[in-house]
Image (cartoon, rainbow, N blue to C red):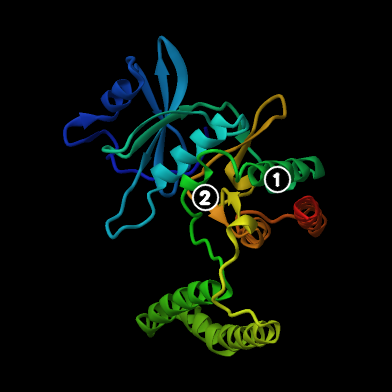
């Protein structure tokens, strides 16, 4: 498993307990070597070597105070659900120690997928994967899964999310007076472009909802939601030597609005797909949604 991660455990030990000891106890077998893997802005990842099994990957999650998202629970429970239902293009969940914020997964030998190497076949494979997740939303245990990170199920929830982010940016720019041209440019962009456009779109959306008779705080029905990795794209995938693609990093996994899921993929700054590939992905997802609607009629 090659992914981005967070860490509760320090580099070598936590409260006198070495990482190697923690994962050895989790696996029920002695880990003889731990190798720090690259990547992971929010967590740490180690490849584990054992004489009796593996290799494995230990992922160490950082847990912040204040009731923020439990990334270990979201990822481990999500992958357990997927594996239980036969999905094998994701890491296998092996064991988790929630007290130490540590989970062990099957190791996937593969390499990153540069954006320029993404093919139409890869796009179709991504669409197929998301369609598979959508088809599993009525499986046993699905309702116990959490919401995806920053899931928004109404227009008002989207507006509130954007407003929160805008307030954070405004606070930062106000606290960085006289900090150079970059900060000045950001203030000007927010004031002259983003905020007017944001207000115009809010007004337009409110008017459209008023005409339709639907309030802006009306939630998307549960039946129209989908299961989503949320932070989904080829930046969170590896390709094996045989061409097989595995999707990794499910810390944001859960219930989401399909429209947001598609936007997450198309607009993610870690991917710079060509317009032809973006259109192919969007068309594939629309075809899937339309097919699902026909089946429900």
Left or right: where 258 falls relative to 278: left
Element under disc 2: strand
User: Is 107 situated above or below 54?
Assistant: below
In front of the other: 297 or 15 = 297
Q: Position of residue 90 (x, y in %)?
A: 58, 34
User: Is 218 situated above or below 54?
Assistant: below
Quadrant location of the C terminus in the rendered image: bottom right
Can residue 230 be seen in the rendering of this structure?
Answer: yes
Disc number placed over residue 254 in the picture, else none? 2
Q: Position of residue 123 (x, y in %)?
A: 75, 46
Element under disc 1: helix
In front of the other: 172 or 296 = 296
Instruction: Specify the quadrant of the image occupied by residue 20.
Output: top left
User: Is 37 situated above or below 130?
Assistant: above
Can residue 274 be seen in the rendering of this structure?
Answer: no
In front of the other: 4 or 106 = 106
User: Which residue position is annotated with label 1?
Assistant: 131
Disc number placed over residue 214 in the picture, else none? none
Tell me the residue at 46%/42% (across/down): 75
Left or right: where 187 falls relative to 18: right
Left or right: where 231 falls relative to 175: right
Q: Position of residue 219 (x, y in %)?
A: 56, 68
Structural distance between the alpha carbons of marks 2 and 1: 14 Å
Q: Position of residue 105 (x, y in %)?
A: 46, 29
């Amino acid at each position: 498993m090659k992914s981005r991660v967070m860490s509760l455990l320090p580099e070598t030990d936590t409260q006198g307990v070495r990482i190697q000891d923690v994962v050895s106890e989790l696996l029920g077998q002695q880990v003889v070597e731990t190798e720090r893997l690259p990547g992971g802005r929010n967590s740490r990842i180690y490849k584990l070597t054992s004489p009796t099994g593996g290799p494995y990957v230990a992922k160490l999650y950082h847990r912040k105070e204040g009731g923020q998202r439990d990334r270990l629970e979201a990822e481990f429970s999500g992958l357990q659900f997927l594996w239980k239902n036969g999905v094998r293009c994701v890491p296998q969940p092996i064991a988790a120690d929630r007290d130490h914020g540590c989970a062990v997964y099957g190791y996937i030998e593969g390499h990153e997928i540069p954006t320029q190497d993404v093919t139409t076949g890869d796009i179709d494979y991504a669409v197929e994967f998301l369609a598979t997740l959508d088809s599993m939303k009525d499986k046993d245990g699905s309702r116990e899964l959490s919401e995806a990170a920053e899931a928004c199920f109404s227009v008002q929830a989207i507006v509130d999310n954007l407003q929160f982010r805008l307030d954070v940016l405004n606070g930062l720019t106000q606290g960085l007076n006289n900090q150079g041209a970059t900060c000045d440019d950001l203030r000007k962009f927010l004031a002259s472009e983003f905020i007017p456009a944001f207000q115009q779109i809010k007004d337009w959306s409110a008017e459209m909802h008023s005409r339709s008779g639907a309030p802006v705080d009306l939630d998307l029905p549960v039946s129209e939601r989908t299961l989503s990795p949320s932070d989904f794209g080829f930046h969170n995938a590896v390709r094996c030597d045989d061409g097989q693609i595995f999707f990794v990093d499910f810390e944001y996994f859960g219930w989401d609005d399909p429209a947001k899921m598609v936007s997450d993929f198309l607009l993610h700054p870690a991917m710079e797909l060509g317009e032809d590939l973006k259109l192919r992905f969007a068309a594939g997802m629309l075809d899937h949604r339309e097919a699902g609607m026909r089946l429900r009629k």
